[in-house]
Amino acid sequence: MSTDHQLLQHLRAGLEFARAVDAHLLVAVSGGPDSVALLRGLVALRAACPLTLTVAHYNHRFRGDAADGDARFVAALAETCGLPSVVASAETGGGPFREESARQVRYEFLEATAQQCGAAFLATGHTRDDQVETVLHHVFRGTGVNGLQGIPRERTTRRGRIIRPLLEVSRTQVLDFLREIGQDYRRDASNDDVRLTRNWLRQELLPKVRERFPQVDAAVARLSSQAAETAELTIWIGRRLLRQGLVRREPKLVELATGCWQEYPPAAWRAALVELWTEQEWPRQEMGYDRWEELAALAAADSGAVTLPGNIEARKVGAILTIRPL
């Protein structure tokens, strides 16, 4: 196949963005159209890119025979492509399906497998449609600017890097690509269950929105990119302020002189404190907007104290803000 195909051009650009053109990739393949298109696209690009590919699939066994069929399909597809594969299954598929816990187990398997086979990157088949659905889901649940970023194009973990080189590709382009090359894929019947919010967004809401606003996908994807740029700038400002105010730093004690922050707006103060929490690896789960506001107000005060989630105490005495786990 010619590498001039639109999907392959986007895929090549995604690899170049992640600096993964000449690398070993572990390709996460569920058997659905997006991940199958990712695999077949990467195989097609090997003529122009010196890629090493390994296929990985995790069977949660939530869907019985259908899930086992997915695993067999992926293993056979990898063999047809002349690629090694790693297929693993949960010991039992009993109990109710939990999307977030299943996702965590799957990524733990994928990251461990990437490390074991020496792959520098874990590639997943997320598309622009996934991005739009994720951003809207965050908006409806109530999100800040960070939630508008949606799915990052790449993410570094302790075990390696996760990349999404199809994030600029629509699901329509995916299906067109698969049809053109005559490639079948698996269909997950659970995706039709509109009781699940993401399925409802995909099956019921977005088709109606697209009728009124045909450019909604491009608009939401652009908003996501702009939010990511804003977040990057906010992190840079936060790090800069943190370095300026840092007086003393230990694993369980930080002292900040916040007087040098006076010329900056409150948002920059919050950014510096968020960056501190990140670098110290303190728990942030319950540190919502109101708690960051409370901490920033304490940093600007002459005196006071507050106990924060994770049993972390912040105390302001004169010019120094002291923060430490209790």
Image: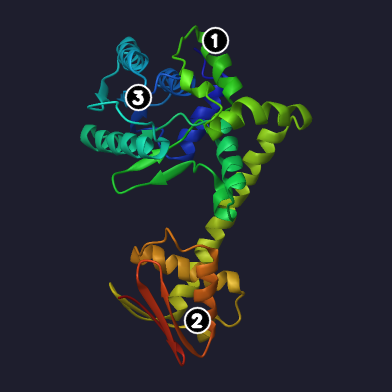
Secondary structure state at the residue bearing disc 3? loop
Taking 76 as reference, is 196 above or below it?
A: below
Disc 3 versus disc 2: distance between alpha carbons?
Answer: 49 Å
Q: Nearer the viewer, residue 126 or 83?
A: 126
Q: Amino acid at mark 3?
A: Phe
Identify the residue position indicated by label 1 in the image. Answer: 179
Name the N-terminal-most of marks 2 and 1: 1
Q: Nearer the viewer, residue 134 or 205?
A: 205
Name the N-terminal-most of marks 3 and 1: 3
Q: Are marks 2 and 1 in contact (CB under 8 Å)?
A: no
Secondary structure state at the residue bearing disc 1? helix
Is 64 situated left or right of 201 in this image?
left
Disc 2 versus disc 1: distance between alpha carbons?
Answer: 59 Å
* Residue 62: assigned label: 3
Q: Amino acid at mark 2?
A: Ala
Q: How many marks?
A: 3
Q: Nearer the viewer, residue 290 or 1?
A: 290
Badge 3: residue crowd in 10 Å (few <14, some 14–19, many ≥20): some
Identify the residue position indicated by label 2 in the image. Answer: 299
Is 64 situated left or right of 209 in this image?
left
In the picture as drawn, the residue positioned furthest to the top comes out as 182
* Residue 219 is at least partly visible in this image: yes
Q: Amino acid at mark 1?
A: Arg
Quarter location, residue 249:
bottom left
Residue in view at x 46 percent, y 90 percent: 319
Q: Position of residue 97 (x, y in %)?
A: 38, 31
Name the N-terminal-most of marks 3 and 2: 3
